[in-house]
Image (cartoon, rainbow, N blue to C red):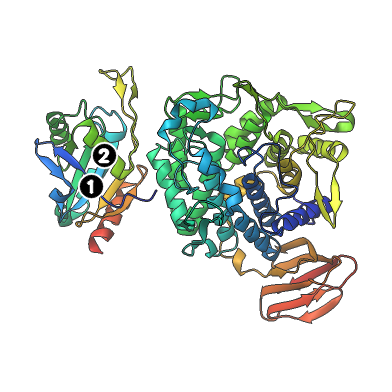
Amino acid sequence: MTTPSVLDEAQLGHLRHWDDLSRRLPHDWSGMQGKGAGEDDFGSYRFQLAYMIYGLALTHRHRLPAAPGVVRPTIQRLIEKLLMPDVWMYWRDASRGGMVMNAHLSEGYHEEWDPVVRDNIMYSAYVQSCALLHDVLFADDRYAQPGALTFEHWSFFWGGEPKRFVYDRESLNENLYWQMVQNGYLGIACEPNCVFQICNQPAILGFRLHDVITGGDRAEEVVAGYQKAWADFGRLDDAGHYNQMILEDTKVVAPNALQAPWVDAWCGALMNTWNRDFVRENYPRQVADFLIPGPDGTISVRSTPAMNVMGQTVVNDTCDLGWVAAWASEMGDRATLDGILAHADRFMNPTWRDGALSYPRNDTPTDADGNRTDIEPMSGNVLIGYARLNVPDGLHTLYQEPWGAEHFAEPALTEVGRDVEVSRAQVVDGVLHARLRRRSGDEATVVIDRVPPGARLRFDGQEIAADGTVTLEVPPGPARDLELVP
Amino acid sequence: MSAPTAIGFDLVDHHGTPVDAGTYRGSWLLVQFGFTSCRVVCPRALTKLTAALDGLGDDVDRVRPLYVTVDPDRDTPDVMKAFLTTSYPRFTGLTGTPEQVEAAKETFRVFARRRADPEDPDGYAVPHTAMTYLVDPDGRWVRHWPDTAEEETLTADLEAALAA
């Protein structure tokens, strides 16, 4: 699969939707609420926000490398939302333990407000890795500033004094690293006592990104320790699917007993960063257990029946279809990815609004013909777009081949007005190529920076004098090509 | 959680003398955790650290290498003394009650877990964090190295720390 140099309408639609979600007013999560209550499960805001950021990072790294101005402000707004108490307040309750698999331990835990100080890697690693993605991709120290990652909550109505937990890129990374060391590199728990393989992968990505900035080798150290620690238990279960988690106290491993697609897909997509051969070796056999062929080449993904525990039906967003799409995109499995996308487009109500594309939540399992229609906000807002925008080995390359200083010396679109659609932005043989289209709206200014002296800028058939920084207004009408020749 | 900043321990050295962090004030401490029955990781680490220390020349006297057990049930002072003086004489062994050792592990963020090992005469091993720590003469943590660090790197880093 080669990477087309121009984004198509659907890809642009996903980027527009992510931009729209990033601009929602504080506490407006409309369209992002899933089936589960309390931000506990796999469709929570934190995952939607984080994987929009990951998707933007992949888009920038692989498809629009010369357009930091398109993705950077969106990532910053999404990180701002990731720090909001609506996203992390669940930890005040989850920190007390009592998860169904280790309810017997709940007396050993206490209420913890600080959402990153212990356990809760299912949140802390996303704050860590998203902040580091931003700073690595834009050669910035925004989140290294003191207090740049601060968690605050205060209510007029209850709770007394304000809660304020101050971190930054370094202190948060240190915190996770030393928790990892003290756990013998097995990983950091999500809910108390539950160390999930999946949720430690973002932390490893974060360590790698931190190494890129500092020149350190912590990712290598942690990966070596992780491999050794899990060698005692096995990364795969007896059926060849990813082990889901390990209970810290008993060292009992929970396999993917139900063969839930999301477990393999999520883990495989992320683990491909550092463990490519292993992930790829197991992928074809694993994914074959999850796919359902449909009409006209469409492919759906099965979900397992909801668990029944303590007489209760577990209600959550599995995001199975979305995660398998994301996994297939990372594996470069074009046939599976195209089949899933075709299924989504045919049966999952693709919805366009002002140039933004999403697949709204639908809790109805199937249509009258048995085709899957159920889709969660995590899949419909985020993962289908992520899969469309990713490239084969997208995360792997992001992890293994960071940009060098030469990238940051190249000309780039550093500021892009909200009403400008950028479908191409890359430097090829020293020439910046971009394609710009103005939507309806007045925010149509583009700033091109790092323009070498004497460069010739051609835009919309005209040649413009260029040196240093160029600001131009994109006129209404069809998409226009821009070329900057040094 | 942060790097281990406040270094404190209350243990017994391999001569049977009670020691704490203050005992070694004025010396740089090179601290390695392990257990004397360890068949691979500890011998490799102690051999490498000994060679790295040899590379320091006269400055080696400014560094006090400590080997802290994670297996206090077996590693008595006598056992540690016999193990270290035979093969790794630069090192002083530290042990204590299980509670004392646990507290030292907590200080250094060390992980260790006892598990069955049919190849061990006593039937168990204690896989553990194999990193090496450097503590300055005032008892402050300075840095650490993973067990993958090369001997030459260790020597160069130690020289830089001692020269600072």
Say what amino acid the circle numbered 2 marks.
Ala
Going by the image, does A380 lie left or right of A220? right
Residue A242 pos. (x, y %): 58, 28
Q: Chain of mark 1?
A: B
Q: Quadrant of residue A312?
A: top right
Same chain assignment for discs 2 and 1: yes
Please identify the quadrant where the C terminus of chain A is shown. Answer: bottom right
Say what amino acid the circle numbered 1 marks.
Gly
Q: Quadrant of residue A271?
A: top right
Q: Quadrant of residue A267?
A: top right
Number of numbered markers: 2
Residue A76 visible in the snapshot? yes
Labels 2 and 1: the sequence-earlier one = 1
Residue at image point 71% right, 33% down: A320
Residue at image point 67% right, 74% down: A449
> How many neighbours does mark 1 have within 10 angstroms: few (below 14), some (14-19), or many (20 or more)?
some
Going by the image, does A281 lie left or right of B50? right
> How many neighbours does mark 2 have within 10 angstroms: few (below 14), some (14-19), or many (20 or more)?
some
Question: Which mark is drawn over residue A52?
Answer: none
In the rendered structure, are the residues bearing label 2 and label 1 in contact, judged by CB atoms less than 8 Å apart? yes
Residue B88 visible in the snapshot? no
Q: Which residue is mark 2?
A: B103
Residue at image point 49% right, 57% down: A162
Please identify the quadrant where the N terminus of chain A is shown. Answer: top right
Residue at image point 35% right, 36% down: B111
The alpha-carbon separation of the residues under discs 2 and 1 comes to: 9 Å
Q: Which residue is mark 1?
A: B8
SS under mark 2: helix
SS under mark 1: loop
Q: Chain of mark 2?
A: B
